[in-house]
Amino acid sequence: MEKAFVAQRVATKLFATEAAVDQAMVEATEFMADMLKARSDVKVSMVFADEAQVKLMEAIKALSEARTAMVGVHNELAEAQLRLGVRTKMNGYEKPNFLRHAEKTVMRDVG
């Protein structure tokens, strides 16, 4: 199989994983906001469900660490791509938009 097609397959999975981590962070932070608002809406003490809030903050921190790790993966793969001599041609998009089924990244061998 050509290097460009393999690189494209890996890049597509990378972008999907990055988007999933970002979406998980969005969901978790929105959940935190909803939990805080719910406590206020039912007029209970700040100590009510405090442990749940602490656990959710730990999860958000873990998601943030996962995002940072994915940035590292992205950078490492970008270097590997250059070492393989594969260049990216981006059809007007920085990344494929998986939610709107945008055009996919096209890669080709160079050199």
Image: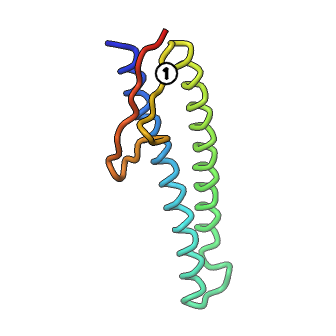
Asked whether, in this view, residue 47 is left or right of residue 87, the answer is right
Determine the image quadrant of residue 8.
top left
Q: Quadrant of residue 72?
A: top right
Q: Residue at x 51, y 13 (%)?
A: 85
Total residue callouts: 1
Res. 17 visible in picture: no
**In the image, residue 90 lies at what x, y percent?**
45, 34
Q: Name the image colouring.
A: rainbow
What is the x, y in percent for residue 11?
Answer: 44, 30
* Outermost bottom residue: 43
User: Is disc 1 surrounded by few (<14), some (14 to 19) or many (20+) residues within 10 Å?
Assistant: some
Residue at the image position 58 percent from the left and 55 percent from the top = 59
Q: Circle 1 — which element?
A: strand
- The residue where tag 1 is placed is 87
Amino acid type for the residue under numbered disc 1: Arg
Residue 30, percent from left and from top? 53, 68
Residue 60 or 78: which is nearer the viewer? 78
Q: Left or right: where does residue 58 sit relative to residue 97? A: right
Give the answer, above or below, for where 23 lies relative to 84.
below
Location of the N terminus (image quadrant): top left
Residue at 43% in and 14% down: 109
What residue appears at the point 61 percent right and 49 percent down from the top-left corner?
Answer: 62
Does residue 31 sit above or below 99 in this rendering? below
Q: Is residue 78 visible?
A: yes
Q: Nearer the viewer, residue 76 or 45?
A: 76
Q: Position of residue 53 (x, y in %)?
A: 61, 68
